[in-house]
Structures are given as C-alpha cells and as structure tokens.
Image: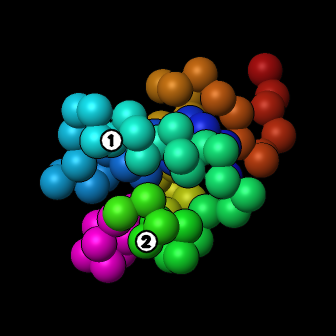
Amino acid sequence: MTPDEIWLRLMKVSSLYGDRMVEIAQRLCAAASVDREALHAVGMTAAQAKLFFRLDEHELDETRPLAGTTGSSSVTG
C-alpha cells in the first residue's frame, strides 16, 4: 500500500485527526504490510479499521489524479 493510499484511507476515518493521524500514518508507511493486525498494532479500533478498509478501488482511482499519483491502469494522452 502506498503512502498516498494510506493517507487517503486515514482521511475516511472521521475519528482520527491531528498528531494522532500523522503518527499512525508514519507507522503504517513504515510497516511491512498494512492489514487488520497492523492497524490494531498502531492503536486503531476495529471500527476504525473497518472504515479504513471501506475505501474501494473506484474511490481510489477517482482521488489519485487529485493526489498527483497514478493507479495501476494505463495512462493515455
């Protein structure tokens, strides 16, 4: 999972903000994998993890151009 995707997913978790969100993002970006166990290890609740993983590929594809990233699909132009 890319750092941009981690941030986009964290922004969907309304109960996370400020320094706590930054700390979680840094720890997840450094993690070998981002799964429910990793989210629990950084202090996220089961409800927060559910919101984190709720973001689907369609939503990610829509936000990637705004974040300046590219997805796995080919770019034409």
Name which residue lies at 53% across and 76% down: 37
Return the mark for residue 8: none
For the magenta stretch, what is the residue range? 44-52
Query: Is residue 20 found left or right of 40 in the rendered image?
Result: left
Residue positioned 34% across, 65% down in the render: 44
User: Mark 2 falls on what kind of element?
Assistant: helix
Q: Is residue 63 magenta?
A: no
Look at mark 1 in the image and give the residue it sits on: 21
Q: Main secondary structure of the magenta part?
A: helix
Q: Residue furthest left?
A: 15
- Residue 57 location, quadrant: bottom right
Q: Residue at x 78, y 20 (%)?
A: 77
Q: CA distance from mark 1 to mark 2?
A: 14 Å
Whether residue 31 sits left or right of residue 48 in the image: it is: right
Count how many numbered circles sit on residues in the image.
Answer: 2
SS label for mark 1: helix
Q: Is residue 62 above or below residue 1?
A: above
The residue depicted at 52 percent of the width and 57 percent of the height is 58
* Label 1 neighbour load within 10 Å: few <14, some 14-19, many 20+: some
For label 2, the residue is 40
Residue 7 on image: x %, y %: 46, 40
| Residue 46 visible, this orientation | yes
Q: Nearer the viewer, residue 12 or 21?
A: 21
* Vertical placement of residue 23 versus 45, above or below: above
Decide which of 55, 11 is in the foreground and name it. Answer: 11
